[in-house]
Image: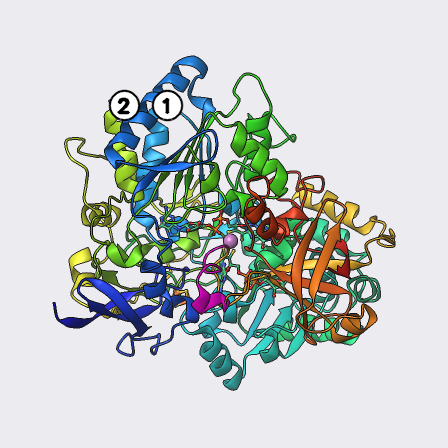
Amino acid sequence: MPTTVVPSFCRNCLAYCPILVTVEDGRAVKVTGDPDAPAFEGYTCPKGRALPAQHNDPARLLHCLAGDEAGAFRPIDSGQVVKDVARRVQDLLARYGPRCIAMYSGTGPVSHPVGAPLARAFFRAVGSRMMFSAATLDKPAEHTSVALHGNWQAGLQTFETSDTWMIVGANPVIARSNGGPLNNPGARLKEAVERGMKLIVVDPRRTETARRAHVHLQLRPGEDPTLLAGIIHILIAEELIDRDFIARHAQGLDALENAVRPFTPEYVAARAGVPQEFLLEAARTFGRGRRGGVVCSTGPSFATHSNLSYYLALCINTLCGRWVRAGERAPFPNVLLPAFTPRAQPWPPFPVESDRPMRVLGLSENASGLPTAALADEILLDGDGQVRALFCLGGNPVLAWPDQLKTEAALRKLELLVVLDYRLTATARFAHYVVPPPLSLELPATTQRVESLKYSGVSRGYPFPWAQYTPAVAQPPADSDLLDDGTFFFLLARQMGLALDWVNPRGQGPNLEGPTTTIPVDMDRPPTADEMVALSCRESRIPLDAVKAHPHGRVFDLDVRVEPREAGCEARLELGAARMMAELMVLRNEDICAAHAAYPLRLICRRANNFMNSVGQSLSCLSGGESLPPAGLHPDDMVSHGLVRGDRLRIRSRHGWMLARAEPDASLRPGIVSVVHGFGDAATLDTAARCAASTSVNRLVDLLERDPITGIPRMTGIPVDIARA
Ligand SMILES: Nc1nc2c(c(=O)[nH]1)N[C@H]1C(S)=C(S)[C@@H](COP(=O)(O)OP(=O)(O)OC[C@H]3O[C@@H](n4cnc5c(=O)[nH]c(N)nc54)[C@H](O)[C@@H]3O)O[C@H]1N2
Ligand SMILES: Nc1nc2c(c(=O)[nH]1)N[C@H]1C(S)=C(S)[C@@H](COP(=O)(O)OP(=O)(O)OC[C@H]3O[C@@H](n4cnc5c(=O)[nH]c(N)nc54)[C@H](O)[C@@H]3O)O[C@H]1N2
Ligand code: SF4
Ligand SMILES: [Mo]
């Protein structure tokens, strides 16, 4: 077969960069950026370029596996897996009812987003609400803050059109994350600064992003809510707020003003550990700017008071009136999502907690969904409603959930664990069945998933009408027996005699852009992956065929204008949510001098350019064969601990310990250890795995300090000590 070069896009992370794939005999052999894709300029990162290595990885699973009690696996036909799992699920349902069947979906579905709707449909069909996801260990406050504050239907002013921008605990240059542009973020940031944008970055590390900042607030980890309250104090005191916007669209200013009164610049600067003049400069720069936004990511999400940090960030946007107004071009007009009418009006707040409690940890189903932090305990606690079967859809709980040893105990206790993954991951090693899917380049996809990021928080996705479709460009390996995630759940449902329906998301919580439609799925034969893509785009603004006509993707010529507030709309953004005002008081009264003599350093996490969470460490082209995660330390801390670059380091928290590789990093605030998350293996299996297991940062994380609404544990600013191992 000849060699061809075909356009596609990378689905490793939610930037979905356009790529060119060189295909030989149906196999992907090379990936480069696609210079013909508008807006991305041929940009890719090492993970994208490693797609062929991932697809051709000798460790890739080509057949389903069945595990036995001793932890050994044997290949098994996919049809047999479907029959076995169906029988076991039916038996559990008959004995314990639907609540005993749960799902955890991780970041894997980013690579194949149209599988998840059928997984959810399966759960609806069996009557179980027990659908958990990585989103509640990631940025659950994106949802709770919107529930408490409300959201703006037309969206936040965009990075592209702003003259100030504040990024709190994100590093978009490396993570293509919330906070910055997705299309070649390094170049976009450089351009923005050159055209005069004043960037404000809040991060304990002078990151690749912070290097472009006008003001970098290199705060103590976890002091984000203090710092944001301080900024609000200054904005109000110096009258840098948009009183006209507030009067028309918000309420609760007096309560907020009172609650932030004790957060004086002196107090905040001392507590957060930043120079007072930097704090004042940041607030004034943002307040005096014409357009801009404050956005948060994992930094403040992993700290305590995460809902409050995100809430205060929304309050700053509202105080400064940074929401898109009537007559302006709508920043997120939907291309492959259905058309809607963006209006210059709020979606009102909604209840942040439901009256559906978990059995454990005092948590409930909440605006961010079901708290994954509670799932291990839900499995471990005997009794009515106990979770006994888990479907793990593209996730790696052993490395991603807090308290690794508890996670492993829970997975071991399950009566049925089905892991849908392409490798025998740390988690899959506990499975009764492992079902490998075709990989991304072997499946069709669209960029719709990135558009729907705006349904999680504010300012996410492409703020321009970009869309692309890719067919499958490579073939699954010869003689493989793979099931994509959607087909697996379809076959399982059919085997159990269930009918599925397809529902596409239309918004966040009760705030919908339009009515959701339910499409019955033809249960006679499994839909092909392309038919699933078509279902997801059934009501798209631009028909899928029109997007397919541009194989390199296209910025569509959509000029959707924001409509004014509707007559009769009473909705207001809430600046003084009682729960948040009370939490500000708690924050102010915290004993910040509480000593941690035995644990003098603070652990923070970060992403690395070569890995997507736990994916990539096993590919030598990305890891360089290194199995220990890098742990950055300020050079002074290296010296005082007698460490040199490359030393094996033992990091200990009150909960556990891990091994890492010491790296001097002058960009860090002194007193901090910055570890890349996602390394490791299962700790309670064989000896070989046990050595690797000690490199997971979740050995150090426990559930004692957790958010009262979302349950997300403290994963940054963890008191630790270090020693050479
Ligand atoms: N201490 C600490 N804990 C953390 C974090 C941290 O920084 N520190 N980060 C948190 C965050 S932000 C997140 S999002 C979570 C991550 O939580 P998870 O999503 O549970 O972990 P990942 O490592 O991203 O696992 C993704 C899995 O999907 C698989 N996969 C990839 N493509 C496909 C596909 O097409 N189909 C299927 N079925 N599987 C696929 C991969 O092989 C991989 O095993 O961890 C959280 N936990
Ligand atoms: N290359 C790469 N890209 C990824 C991923 C990956 O693993 N690798 N993972 C994807 C996923 S699942 C997610 S959720 C996103 C996450 O995207 P981001 O949230 O941008 O993740 P990071 O790059 O780790 O940036 C978090 C920053 O928070 C800082 N930080 C730590 N503690 C604190 C604190 O207490 N306060 C403040 N203000 N900052 C703090 C860290 O120093 C770090 O620079 O990235 C996605 N993209
Ligand atoms: S940033 Fe890297 S991993 Fe993410 S889509 Fe682009 S090439 Fe792929
Ligand atoms: Mo994440």
Give the residue pinned by disc 1: 89
Q: Position of residue 156 (x, y in %)?
A: 48, 61
Q: Position of residue 117 (x, y in %)?
A: 32, 41
Q: Secondary structure at mark 1?
A: helix
- Which secondary structure type mostly characterizes the magenta part of the structure? loop
Q: Position of residue 516 (x, y in %)?
A: 31, 40
Please say whether residue 470 is one of the residues in the magenta stretch. no
Magenta span: 614-624
Is residue 504 visible in the rendered image? The answer is no
Nearer to us in this view, 414 or 129: 414
Q: Residue at x 59, y 46 (%)?
A: 690
Q: Quadrant of the C terminus?
A: bottom right
- The three-letter amino acid code for the residue at tag 1 is Val
Work out whether 87 lies above or below 156: above
Q: Residue at x 84, y 54 (%)?
A: 592
Q: Secondary structure at mark 2?
A: loop
Quadrant of residue 136 in the image?
top right
Work out whether 25 lies above or below 34: above
**Which label is found at residue 401?**
none
**CB within 8 Å, label 1 to label 2:** yes
Nearer to us in this view, 157 or 189: 189
Q: Quadrant of the N terminus?
A: bottom left
> Which of the two labelled residues, at mark 1 and mark 2, occupies the earlier sequence position?
1
Q: Residue furthest top?
A: 95
- The three-letter amino acid code for the residue at tag 2 is Met
Q: Report the side of 153 relative to 470 (left or right).
A: right
Q: Residue furthest bottom?
A: 194
Q: Position of residue 147 (x, y in %)?
A: 54, 43
Q: Residue at x 20, y 48 (%)?
A: 479
Give the residue pinned by disc 2: 496
Separation of disc 1 and disc 2 at Cα?
9 Å
